[in-house]
Image (cartoon, rainbow, N blue to C red):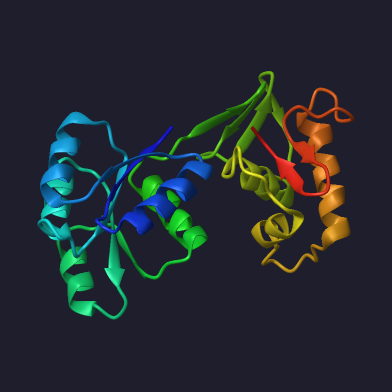
Amino acid sequence: MQRIMIVEDEAAIVRALEDYLRLEGFDTLTASGAAEAQQRMEREEIDLLLVDISLAQGDGFAVCGAAKAQNLPVIFLTASGDENSVVRGLDMGADDYVPKPFRPRELVSRIRSVLRRSGRAQRVVTLGNVEIDTERGTVTKSGGEVALSALEYRLLMAFVNNRGRLLTRNHLLEDIWDVGGDFVNDNTLTVYIKRLREKIEDDPQHPEIIRTVRGLGYRVD
């Protein structure tokens, strides 16, 4: 499990980030100031830092400098319109920045993108006897390759990226909408979930990987 350190001194933002990132399958730890963040970097295994530029104790630039010295990726959280801080942070080697207030799903997308670019993304994901190699884009079951269409693979990755989280049908439709032009509606989604289960489940009639939460949606544990 990838671990993200949140360097932020606003308690409400920290709680919201921790809750959301844990739902997305990340481990989290926190620091409220620059000195605490640098101490934790020396003691803890960390894959990425989310750093508020404006901290009551020290500033985010000092944290970024310490992180880059250890070759750790950094995403800055910045106040809207603070262009000078953004430029300075990027010049220091920050990997990305997200202006406040931010949309959680966009933030998670940026985190995953930075992790991939930095080589810290989890390459192989295991669901029961199914393995997904996210770098090669391949799926195997009990050692044998499973042939998925592009849309079936996107649907599977939507579940993988939200393990443990209830996904409504609307959420899935947003995640797998085909920018190539294929029409994806509620009935089509039902068909694709059925096809995906037939390919990865041992018993598609009693699925153990993609579970139905009656009346609400689906969940992969």
Q: Residue at x 69, y 18 (%)?
A: 142
Image location (x, y in percent) of residue 3: 36, 37
Image location (x, y in percent) of residue 193: 80, 44
Location of the C terminus by quadrant is top right
View extreme (front): residue: 11
Q: Is residue 187 left or right of residue 143?
A: right
Image location (x, y in percent) of residue 96: 31, 61
Above or below 129: residue 134: below
Q: Is residue 102 left or right of residue 138?
A: left
Q: Residue at x 88, y 57 (%)?
A: 187
Q: Is residue 39 left or right of residue 122?
A: left
View extreme (bottom): residue: 81
Q: Residue at x 84, y 60 (%)?
A: 186
- Res. 40 image quadrant: top left
Most foreground residue, 135 or 160: 160
Location of the N terminus by quadrant is top left
Above or below 92: residue 165: above
Q: Is residue 8 left or right of residue 105?
A: left
